[in-house]
Each structure stands twice: as structure tokens, then as C-alpha cells.
Amino acid sequence: MPEPKTLLALAGAPQTPSPLDKAALVLIDAQREYTEGSLPLSGVEEAVAEAGRLLALARKAGVPVFHIVHHGKPGGVLFNPEGPFSAIVPALIPHDGETVVVKGLPNAFAGTDLDARLRATGRTELIVAGFQTHMCVSSTVRAALDLGWRTTLVDAASATRDLPAPGGGTIPAEALHRAVLAALADRFAVVVRDSGAWA
């Protein structure tokens, strides 16, 4: 069997990360539900730290920053907008002038004005990171392609959790994270390890 190649590679698409002067940063669901609440993620502390480095890089370079937050039902078990765990983690609190978009579905474009807000910046590409890799990150990155965005996804600034496998057993978070990144890298995004890709 020949060595596998991504669809992007077969098409001759550029494999370089989105240029900082052409991109907007989208941080997805960096909320306390994943650090202190009912959905602890594997390696979340390290992912938040890397997201902080990515955010600092974006701010220094003048990259527009968009913070996505998920809100569940008021009084609900997860992402209760009236409770403390829907808040953005302290290390990634938005600065004045940075946009916060509230969503109610995994895809951050669904039912929100995110696409219009991004286009208003004049940028043509996205840099994406956040939580959970298999859920809201994947849904948003896939939708971004449909909307015409070229996306770079940052591996180390994203994380997920163990999942029960259909038919029994458990899929470990690291295996799930890697598989989702591989699927997205096939067609939907350039995947880079960390903020060092822009060094």
C-alpha cells in the first residue's frame, strides 16, 4: 500500500498555516465547565496554557480575536448561563474590543452572526483552537469550509475527553483527539502543533 496522503496534499493545496495578517483567531468554548465543572477534559490545563500563548501571539500581531461560548438551558446541568461554569477560564478572559459570540449548538456558525462578524474584519482565513476537539471544534471547522474559509487548527491548544465506544469499551481522549485531527487535516484544515508554527 502507498503511503497515505490527505486530500489537501493530493490537490496541491498549501500546507502552511494561515498568515497572521490575513487571519482571525477563533477560540471555542474555553469555559470553566471543562476545567472545574462536569466535563473535565484530558490535558485541559496544558491546552489552556497553549491557547494563552496563541492568544498572546494574536494580540501582539493585531489579529482579530473571537471568543465563542456555549450556553445551555438556564438551570441546566451543563453550561448553565446563570452558573459559574459557563464563564471563560481566567487565563483567556477577553480584552476590550475582542468579540464574544454565544452559541447554543456545536457549530459556532449555526444560529449566530459569527460569519458576518468575521467577514467584517476583512480577513479571509481562520485560526481555530478550543474545546472539545471532537464536538464543537470539529463542527465549526467543517462548517467553515462550507462557508469558504481556509482554516488552521492548533492541536496543542485543543482537547477532548474519553468517550464510551459504541458496542462497549472506552475510546481514550488522546486517541479520539488524534483521529479527529487526522480527519480534519484530510480536507478541512491545516493542522499545526502549536503557536510555534508562526515563529
Image (cartoon, rainbow, N blue to C red):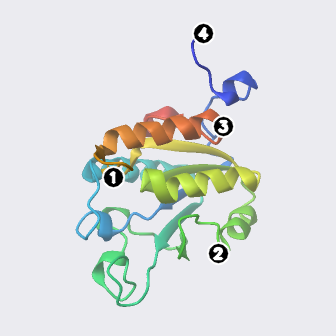
Separation (CA) of disc 3 from disc 4:
19 Å
**Given the image, on which type of amino acid does mark 4 rest?**
Pro
Density class for disc 2 (Cα within 10 Å; few <14, some 14-19, many ≥20) is some
The residue that mark 1 highlights is 163
The residue that mark 2 highlights is 112
Q: Upstream in the sequence, badge 4 or badge 1?
A: 4
Q: Secondary structure at mark 3?
A: helix
Separation (CA) of disc 2 from disc 4:
43 Å
Q: Secondary structure at mark 4?
A: loop
Which one is in front, 56 or 188? 188
Q: Upstream in the sequence, badge 2 or badge 4?
A: 4
**Given the image, on which type of amino acid does mark 2 rest?**
Thr
**Given the image, on which type of amino acid does mark 3 rest?**
Arg
Separation (CA) of disc 2 from disc 1:
28 Å
Residue 152 image point, x, y percent? 58, 42
Location of residue 66 (image quadrant): bottom right
